[in-house]
């Protein structure tokens, strides 16, 4: 005897869109915003606190496209390493949720989008965009051959200052404040990304890849404190060069206090992986506090 009971509908196959979002790290805004912050610093300071809306949109969208491409390139390089690291083993390529071909296609699309936006910039800014691409692409290789790969990342981050500044300046160029802001971004990035790397020290040591956290060893908290101190010095001198107003100096004082608090926590004890991630994310807030001071301070220019 047979029955005609309806069969359950098979579950629809999972779509790759969620995995693509995670490949680009758009599900983790802290890492995207912390790249956007120095770009906005440069744009605001180069325009006296009044950036033109079209250029502001180009910078914001370009940041998401470029950082997404960088994350995808990183995961392509590390697809056989990430499964061995607790923090990264669920990434789409590490878990084989996405294929290499799809990841390459996503990377190309992101880079094409970034290149299309760069076409709206002046020749100097476009040239800086071109120079940034090999640095972004080679950063994942640096951890295999260079003892402080976070420095390579910091140099890549530095382009996020130079490109908007040169695009907004009239005439196009890179004045002394731009280089001071570039230096601040280099040291800030090296500091907060060393914090990020401290969560992976045991995995990185076991696998045999380099990181600034391993390079500095027990002195990593001291190195981070020095990086934050140098960041503050660079921002102090940029403020003097641009004659920024009182609100900027107040926000810089707040940032210095928060960096000091982070350094104190790192110096006192070993933290959990989650705690290192929290300290890293706090730098996004610090960056936006400084941005607010730059906007308000720029309005008081003579």
Image: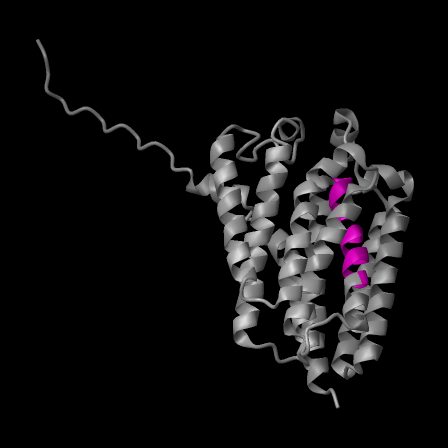
Residue toward you, 246 or 267: 246
Is residue 251 magenta-colored?
no
Q: Which residues are magenta?
A: 183-199
Tell me, yes or no, if residue 194 can be seen here: no
- Quadrant location, the N terminus: top left
From the top left corner, tell me how far across and down residue 234 is, in percent: 84, 67
Q: Which residue does the image show at 59% across and 34% down from the upper left? A: 76
Residue toward you, 265 or 202: 202
Work out whether 33 lies above or below 144. Answer: below
Q: How many labels sit on residues?
A: 0
The residue furthest left is: 1
Work out whether 279 lies above or below 58. Answer: above
Work out whether 122 lies above or below 275. Answer: below
From the top left corner, tell me how far across and down residue 231 is, in percent: 83, 62
Q: Main secondary structure of the magenta part?
A: helix
Quarter location, residue 292:
bottom right
Tell me, yes or no, if residue 265 can be seen here: yes
């Amino acid at each position: 005897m047979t029955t005609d009971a309806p069969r359950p509908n098979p579950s629809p196959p999972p779509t790759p869109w969620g995995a693509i979002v995670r490949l680009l790290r758009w599900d983790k805004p802290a890492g995207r915003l912390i790249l956007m912050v120095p770009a906005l610093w440069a744009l605001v300071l180069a325009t006296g606190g009044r950036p033109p809306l079209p250029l502001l949109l180009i910078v914001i969208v370009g940041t998401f496209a470029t950082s997404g491409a960088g994350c995808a390139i990183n995961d392509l390089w590390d697809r056989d390493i990430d499964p061995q690291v607790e923090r990264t083993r669920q990434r789409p390529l590490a878990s084989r949720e996405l294929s290499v071909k799809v990841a390459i296609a996503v990377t190309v699309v992101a880079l094409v989008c970034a290149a299309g936006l760069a076409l709206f910039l002046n020749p100097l800014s476009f040239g800086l965009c071109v120079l940034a691409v090999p640095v972004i692409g080679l950063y994942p290789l640096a951890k295999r051959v260079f003892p402080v790969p976070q420095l390579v990342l910091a140099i890549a981050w530095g382009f996020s200052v130079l490109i908007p500044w040169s695009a907004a300046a009239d005439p196009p160029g890179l004045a002394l404040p731009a280089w001071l802001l570039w230096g601040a971004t280099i040291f800030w990035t090296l500091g907060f990304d060393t914090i990020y790397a401290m969560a992976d020290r045991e995995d990185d040591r076991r696998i045999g890849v380099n990181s600034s956290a391993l390079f500095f060893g027990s002195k990593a908290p001291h190195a981070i404190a020095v990086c934050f101190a140098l960041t503050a010095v660079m921002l102090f001198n940029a403020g003097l060069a641009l004659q920024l107003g009182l609100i900027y100096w107040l926000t810089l004082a707040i940032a210095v206090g928060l960096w000091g608090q982070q350094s104190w926590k790192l110096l006192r004890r070993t933290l959990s992986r989650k705690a290192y991630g929290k300290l890293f994310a706090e730098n996004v807030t610090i960056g936006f506090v400084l941005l607010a001071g730059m906007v308000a301070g720029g309005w008081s220019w003579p």
